[in-house]
């Protein structure tokens, strides 16, 4: 991406958003960040991420809910945007069971508002947005391919993400927009989310509390380190090759393309912490899936995406960061 171009990043105070903004700033790109700082998890953690970003040149932040489409579409910086990286969303599978309207507001209305922004922005910016591997539902064929059927979501979260893909397809066709959806596979790393399993595992192990191991540990996940995910996002957002000529709407898997058993994942956390977990084995939870694994051949072919961080290295990095940050987290009431 040419120097001095401006990228809009939604969900800038979030886990992936924070790392994406940081990577863009490191490249000398100017970034406008949006986030509503909701309390789904620790607002103090989100503010800590923002505080680190605000110390750097080239970053401006606006506290704004993307579902407020009128405020979004009347913002005075719309004409400056060259590219949009849309990461804001209501996350979590289990949370959706009790809070469905949060997902409708953020993931449906919010995504529609961002599509309208892309449509109306003077520069017709490329839009790269976050989808999820959850759209594959209970598919049993692995690795998951972009051509696999995705008509049977097993959670509301997954249903909203698939709806975002369909909305994007319609907008690309109707208005000649260049849109790219990324189906993320279990992203982990420093500055992660407290509702994610690896964070709660670390917290409970250190506190001497049991960890909940669902389906008796018989789950497999495609764990993807945050730096690898961000490298893929930036590569796509900053490319300007012939494959990005508008109008088009493409969807890519972005993961590590390796399955790891949950029990092995826990073992690595125990090794990094130097402490064994107390395990409580529980049945499969509503909305969960047994296995995920990404076929990344398409994104590798088109953008050279190649994850390089082994799980052993990524977990060690997260645990080091977690131990450093934990006193601040506890001090602020978690």
Image: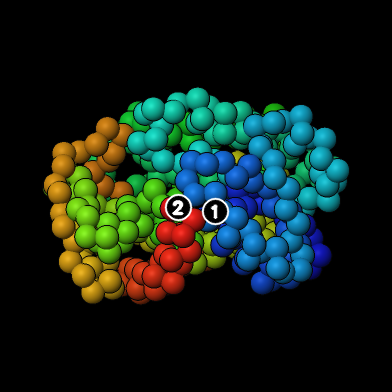
Q: Which disc number belongs to residue 44?
A: 1
In front here: 47 or 75?
A: 47
**Residue at (83% x, 47% y) in the render:** 77
User: Image check: 260 left or right of 246?
Assistant: left
**Residue at (45% x, 52% y) in the render:** 333
| Label 1 CA crowd tier, 10 Å (few <14, some 14–19, many 20+) | some
User: Image check: 67 left or right of 213?
Assistant: right
Residue 98 found in image quarter:
top left
In front here: 204 or 66?
A: 204
**Residue at (50% x, 25% y) in the render:** 101
| Quadrant where the image shows the N terminus | bottom right
Residue 151, percent across and down? 39, 28
| Label 2 CA crowd tier, 10 Å (few <14, some 14–19, many 20+) | few
Q: CA distance from mark 2 to mark 1?
A: 9 Å
Residue 4, percent across and down? 81, 65
In the displayed structure, 316 sits above or below 96; it is below
Residue 116, percent across and down? 72, 33
- Residue indicated by mark 2: 333
**Residue at (52% x, 56% y) in the render:** 45
Q: Nearer the viewer, mark 2 or mark 1?
A: 2
Residue 282, percent across and down? 16, 42
User: Image check: 16 left or right of 85?
Assistant: left
SS label for mark 1: helix
- Return the disc, 2 or 1, that comes first in the chain's sequence: 1
Q: Are marks 2 and 1 in contact (CB under 8 Å)?
A: yes
SS label for mark 2: loop
Residue 269 appears in the rendering: yes
Residue 239 appears in the rendering: no
């Amino acid at each position: 991406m040419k120097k001095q171009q401006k990228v809009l990043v939604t969900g800038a105070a979030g886990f992936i958003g924070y790392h994406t903004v940081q990577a863009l700033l490191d490249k000398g790109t100017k970034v406008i960040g949006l986030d509503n700082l909701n309390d789904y998890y620790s607002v103090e953690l989100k503010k800590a991420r923002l505080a680190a970003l605000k110390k750097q040149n080239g970053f401006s932040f606006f506290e704004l809910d993307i579902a407020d489409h009128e405020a979004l579409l009347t913002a005075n910086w719309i004409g400056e945007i060259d590219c949009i990286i849309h990461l804001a969303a209501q996350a979590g599978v289990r949370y959706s069971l009790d809070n469905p309207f949060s997902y409708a507001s953020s993931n449906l209305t919010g995504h529609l508002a961002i599509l309208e922004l892309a449509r109306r922005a003077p520069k017709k910016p490329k839009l790269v947005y976050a989808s999820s591997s959850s759209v594959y539902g209970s598919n049993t064929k692995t690795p998951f391919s972009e051509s696999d059927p995705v008509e049977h979501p097993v959670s509301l979260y997954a249903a909203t993400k698939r709806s975002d893909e369909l909305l994007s397809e319609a907008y690309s066709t109707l208005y000649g927009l260049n849109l790219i959806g990324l189906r993320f596979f279990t992203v982990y790393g420093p500055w992660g989310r407290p509702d994610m399993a690896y964070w709660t595992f670390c917290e409970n192990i250190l506190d001497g509390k049991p960890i909940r191991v669902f389906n008796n540990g018989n789950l497999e996940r495609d764990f993807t380190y945050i730096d690898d995910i961000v490298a893929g996002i930036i590569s796509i957002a900053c490319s300007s090759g012939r494959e990005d000529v508008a109008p088009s709407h493409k969807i890519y898997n972005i993961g590590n393309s390796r399955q790891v058993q949950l029990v092995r994942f826990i073992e690595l956390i125990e090794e990094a912490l130097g402490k064994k977990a107390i395990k409580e084995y529980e049945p499969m939870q509503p909305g969960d899936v047994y296995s995920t694994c990404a076929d990344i051949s398409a994104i590798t072919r088109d953008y050279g995406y190649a994850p390089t961080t082994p799980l052993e290295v990524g977990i060690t990095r997260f645990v080091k960061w977690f131990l450093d940050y934990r006193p601040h987290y506890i001090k602020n009431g978690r």
